[in-house]
Image (cartoon, helix red, strand yellow):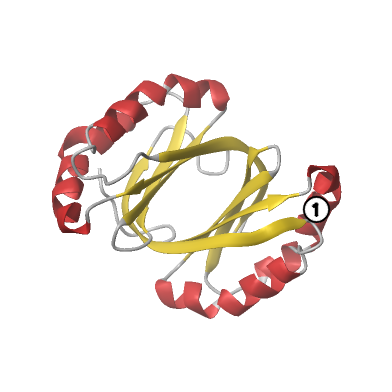
Amino acid sequence: MTTSGQGPSDFRFTAFDFDPTKYDAMMSSFDNARDRVKNIPGLLNVRVVRTLENRMMVMSGYRSRDALNAATEAHSSIFADFAQYIVGEPLVRSGERVARVIGEVPMNEFKYMRFVRVVINPTKYDAMMSYLNGGVLESFKDIAGLSRVIITRNSEDHIFSAAGYIDKTSADAAAETMQNAVAGMAEYMTEAPLIREGELVWLYQFNV
């Protein structure tokens, strides 16, 4: 099901590798940056997920595209302070929300996330969205332990899905539904999907 209205309309995704021996210090730095994050206009939430022993995914949701663009300098400044922990260059992508599924778990209670990146033939984007909105997204709605599925279009040919679950057990139980959905997109994709997942390790939520 596609929804509109409440919640972030645009998202920034920042993936980076880090030195695992500095994990605790890095998480303290996230806590120290909380006040700076709170002062970013239009930023509604930030979720930090550890997808590998040495990799993080930071998902930031904004009220609008203008708010996302205006926050770019603040985003860069905060991540510059994390340089002592980061290995290599962060990979930053942003996109507009094009679909959303709301599950049974309140948005502030999920603890596990799964990210799926697909590369598509951009001429087939409308057909792909018709496929997703033709019942595929609806099939996620009643999955036990699901909170949200957010789908963004990060470029003409890159589609990104972020799903939040109450725990890993729920995410694993939903894997077949996810795999069936991705398999049905094969005719629209130009390469195999990239899947990353992990525990939510840090959260900022506006007005919470």
Camera-side residue: 173 or 124? 124
Instruction: Identify the residue at horizontal 67%, vertical 67% (top origin).
Output: 37
What secondary structure is marked by label 1?
helix
Camera-side residue: 133 or 86? 86
The quadrant the C terminus occupies is: bottom right
Q: Position of residue 180 (x, y in %)?
A: 28, 27
Instruction: Identify the residue at horizontal 67%, vertical 50% (top origin).
Output: 17
Q: Position of residue 48 (x, y in %)?
A: 63, 49
Is residue 18 shown left or right of residue 196? right
Q: Is residue 98 in view from this perspective?
A: yes
Is residue 59 shown left or right of residue 11? right
Quickly name the residue at label 1: 26
Pointer 1 local density, CA inside 10 Å: few below 14, some 14–19, many at least 20: some
- What amino acid does circle 1 point to? Met
The quadrant the N terminus occupies is: top left
Examine the rendered structure and indicate whether residue 27 appears above or below residue 5.
above
Q: How many marks?
A: 1
Instruction: Identify the residue at horizontal 78%, vertical 48% (top origin).
Output: 19
Q: Position of residue 16 (x, y in %)?
A: 64, 54
Examine the rendered structure and indicate whether residue 20 appears above or below residue 142.
below
- Quadrant hosting residue 82: bottom right
Examine the rendered structure and indicate whether residue 197 appears above or below residue 173.
below
Instruction: Identify the residue at horizontal 28%, vertical 51% (top origin).
Output: 3
Is residue 19 shown left or right of residue 186? right
Q: Position of residue 135 (x, y in %)?
A: 19, 34
Q: Is residue 112 in view from this perspective?
A: no
